[in-house]
Amino acid sequence: MNHNNYNFKRSMTVASCICASLAICSSVALAAGLNNQESDGYLQWMHSLEVVMKSRGTSGLAEGNLLYPFDVPGWQGDETRPYRHLSISKAINELEKQWLLRGESRTKSTLVALANARNYVNLSEYDSATVWFNKAAALDTDKNFFREIGKERLATATADRDSLAILSAISNTLGLSSITGHESQYILALRWLLIQRDAETLDLIIQKIQAEGSNLPDRLRFWLAYSLAWRNDNTGSLEHLRILINSGGLSRDLTERQRSWVLLAIPDFLFLAGDHTSSRSLYEVLANSQVPELSTWGSYQVANLDLLSGRYLRASEGFKRVCESKRLGSWQDQACEMAKVASEIERIKSKGEPYGAGSFYNP
């Protein structure tokens, strides 16, 4: 189940080589929306993403996403591994035989139950896996496998789309005494609730994380920021995104699309907050990116800012470039129409000067 739906300065010693490669130092230097360290981090994120995508494009490899909900890599190549399922089936038979031989009066093993559950997961028999996860949870009185069972049981219920089991597992997640050690479980809960558009339960998970979490792992912080954005809390989301880019330009266990969303969301939130100066500087960074999705959106937003500031000719030219670029989304239809509108306003402005009408079109 894939669930990537994403659309969308400064210590000179750190940023100089990056700025040189992107040719955007001058546009970034005066952005007030981010402090110096955050601005460095933003450039590093951009540079790192460009390097990764360029290298992958050269090698012809697909993006290396982790499969949801189990966070495991997809199989590489066309190999079908015909004996893998047979081996797992044999293992299940042996383990279940051991379980029966123990008898009701004898001690049963949490580890055997957990092994059975995982084997059934590998066979994609999620209903049987859930039964064994429940047995493992009941036997794990010492909580030796508490974290593993909690996360894997929720993932299995999600893969099985068993809404009752999922809600039960999410309720258990909310009841945990601490999020520490259970971060993956909280990520999984957030992602499921976003898919289901369950705002009420999502808010409970958000509140739980925010009440306890100050030193969150980057991946959980990303999903928290994304969830806050979905709940229209742009200010709260931006706060976490600032912390995220402060951590530097490595992948932070995020996919390319997720990293791209961070780079798009920050200037968008600044723009929506009315900080046009800061957002413009970051949009100009995006417009110079080697990643088409980022570059086209950055150019589109720069054209919007030109329109808002009364530079209609520049806005028209910018919208036209976006309209004629590679098709990425329906918002490019808007760019095509706005190119005509901005051009017409510029014509009226210039033609109207002899009659004093031009003043009506000045910002």
Image: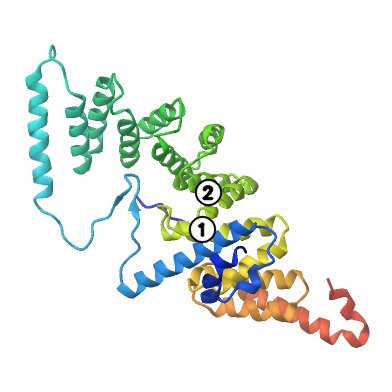
Q: Which numbered marker is on residue 261?
A: 1
Given residues 162 and 359, the one toward you in this image is 359
Residue lying furthest top? 105
Q: Compared with residue 129, is residue 238 higher up or lower down, i.e. above or below?
A: below
Q: Secondary structure under badge 2? A: helix
Residue 340 visible in the snapshot:
no
On the image, the x and y values in percent for residue 182 come to 40, 34
Residue 138 visible in the snapshot:
yes
Based on the displayed image, in which of its 4 quarters is residue 282 positioned?
bottom right
Name the residue tied to disc 2.
226
On the image, the x and y values in percent for residue 28 come to 64, 68
Q: Secondary structure under badge 1? A: helix
Q: Which numbered marker is on residue 342?
A: none
For image coordinates 33% across by 47% down, the residue present is: 71
Quadrant showing the C terminus? bottom right
On the image, the x and y values in percent for residue 136 come to 24, 26
Q: Is residue 168 left or right of residue 145?
A: right
Bin the neighbour count of mark 2 within 10 Å (Cα to Cα): few under 14, some 14-19, many 20 and up.
Answer: many
For image coordinates 52% across by 48% down, the residue present is: 226
Bin the neighbour count of mark 1 within 10 Å (Cα to Cα): few under 14, some 14-19, many 20 and up.
Answer: some
For image coordinates 7% across by 27% down, the residue present is: 97
Residue type marked 1: Trp
Residue lying furthest front? 13
Residue type marked 2: Tyr
Based on the displayed image, in which of its 4 quarters is residue 311 positioned?
bottom right
Q: Compared with residue 40, is residue 153 higher up or lower down, i.e. above or below?
A: above
Q: Compared with residue 119, is residue 234 higher up or lower down, i.e. above or below?
A: below
Name the image colouring. rainbow
For image coordinates 12% across by 24% down, the residue present is: 99
Q: Is residue 242 left or right of residue 221?
A: right
Check whether the beta carbons of the residues at disc 2 and disc 1 lie within 8 A of each other: yes
On the image, the x and y values in percent for residue 290 come to 49, 74
